[in-house]
Structure formats: structure tokens, C-alpha cells
Amino acid sequence: MRYSLIPNCTSKEGIHHTVSTIGNETSPFLNPGYKFSVSASLLEDQCFEDFDGSSYINNLMNGDYTITDIHIYYSVSLEWKTGLKWKGEKMNVLEKLWDQKMLMDCVIVASNKAEIMCHRSILAAHSDVLFAMLTCGLEESQTNRIRMEETSELGINILVKYFYKNEVDDKEISFEVALELLQMAHKYDISKLEVIMLNILFRKSEEWFTLDNVVDLYVDTKQVADVTSGNDSYCYGLLRDRMFNIIKR
């Protein structure tokens, strides 16, 4: 007997049937269920004779008894492969916007009056404070110019680069720039950058700081820890206490 079944069965699928009795002998196949499955690349008019479960179905169909009812439950799962492969390189859109300075529409002014170009939508996405400045009818929303004149040109460049690349290379920044980034992150509510900078400064060895650095950082972190609560106060407090311990030595 040949079978051209092309299913891919789950636990509820298979052949279920009802049989009658022959004489006084009850069929050994009374109401069983036989699972079957075929997994292969299918061609048009293809016929499968040997598949998982086929021997049981042969016994069922060729037995010496009368089958009164057969139910076949099956499903077919198809998978297509086009053979086409993407050979291009993966592209980070934000990095491309930054590296190629594409269609920039906003300016940040640094302490030395240098102007760092960027995209206002990127600033707004990273900071609720910057979003408000650029959308609430303030001067910045009219001119697309944001003055950060307390911050160095290098600090702003690293800040804006973080907006596009989502990383800060702590090996390339000085204490002064690290402190600027921490202060900007807190002022403009850039919470992820704030956590990054707290961690960077906390992990630095004592030798990395000068005494003036330690005092400046202690004063800054103490001010924030004293006026905030919850996790912010706790994290700034840890860094404050570390600076205090360095001063005591």
C-alpha cells in the first residue's frame, strides 16, 4: 500500500479510528491513535512510502478486522529559502549621522564659543530637559542653539558623541572632562550617562586623582547627595564617601 501523506504532526495529530469485532475476537487495534510525521524538502506530486509511523498504519490497514471509521488529523509546516544573501555591511544609522554630520539642525555652544553641530531630535530623545528646552517656546526652540557655556568644547563633543554611539571611553578623558560629563548628565537628566560617569569615577584608582580633584569631586557629590533621595542619593553618597576617605589619608 502506498501513502502520499505529507504532514508534520503535533501530539494531537495522527490517525484515529474505530473498528468492529470479527467473531468473538476483539480487534487488538481498538480505538488507538497512530502518530506520523514527514520532514523533507517537498517536490510537486511527490509520494512518501516510508515515513515515521508508516509501519503502524500498514498494520492497521491490512489487519483481519473491519474498520468502520478513520479520522486523519494533520498539519503542514512550510519553510521557504530564497537563496538570496545580504552581502552588505551592517549599518548603525546613528553612528552614520554623527560620523558624516548628515543634515544636522542644532548647535551647542561651548565655553570657548565653539559650536558643536548635532540633531535636535537626538538631544530630545536622550534628555527630557533638552526636549523641553527645544519644544516649549523658549529661546532654544526658536534658534536651535543651546548654550552650555560652563562646559568645555571637548566635554560637549564627548557628550554629543555619547548620544550617537552610546558609549564613553574612560581611557580618553581627563578628570576635568569626567566631572563635566557627570555634572551635565545630572543637570540635563541624562540618567544612563550619569550612572556611567559615577561608575567610571568610582573605579578610578587613588593615583588618578590629584588632591584638588578629590576635593572638587567631594564637594560636588555631597551637594547632589544632600538634595536628592533614593538611588541618586545613595550612588552620589558612595562616591562622596570614597573621596572623603581619600582626603583623610
Image (cartoon, helix red, strand yellow):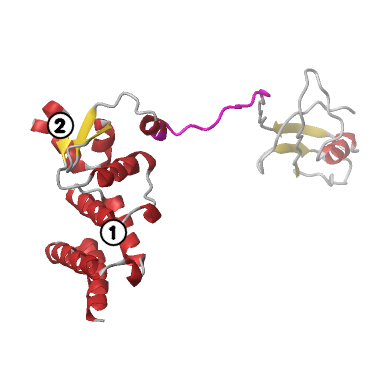
Residue 108's place in the image compared with 207, above or below, is above
Q: Nearer the viewer, residue 193 or 174?
A: 174
Q: Nearer the viewer, residue 193 or 161?
A: 161
Using the image, tell me which numbered label, if any, was put on residue 249.
Answer: none
Residue 100's place in the image compared with 244, above or below, is above
Tell me which amino acid carries mark 2.
Thr
Mark 1 crowdedness (10 Å alpha carbons): few <14, some 14-19, many ≥20? some
Tell me which amino acid carries mark 1.
Phe
Percent x, y of residue 232: 22, 61
Q: Which residue is mark 2?
A: 135
Q: Is residue 60 left or right of residue 213?
A: right
Residue 211's place in the image compared with 185, above or below, is below
Q: Is residue 248 left or right of residue 56?
A: left
Q: Earlier in the sequence, mark 1 or mark 2?
A: 2
Helix or strand or loop: what does disc 2 sit on?
Answer: helix
Mark 2 crowdedness (10 Å alpha carbons): few <14, some 14-19, many ≥20? some
Q: Which residues are magenta?
A: 82-95
Q: Residue at x 30, y 51 (%)?
A: 193
Q: Which residue is mark 1?
A: 175
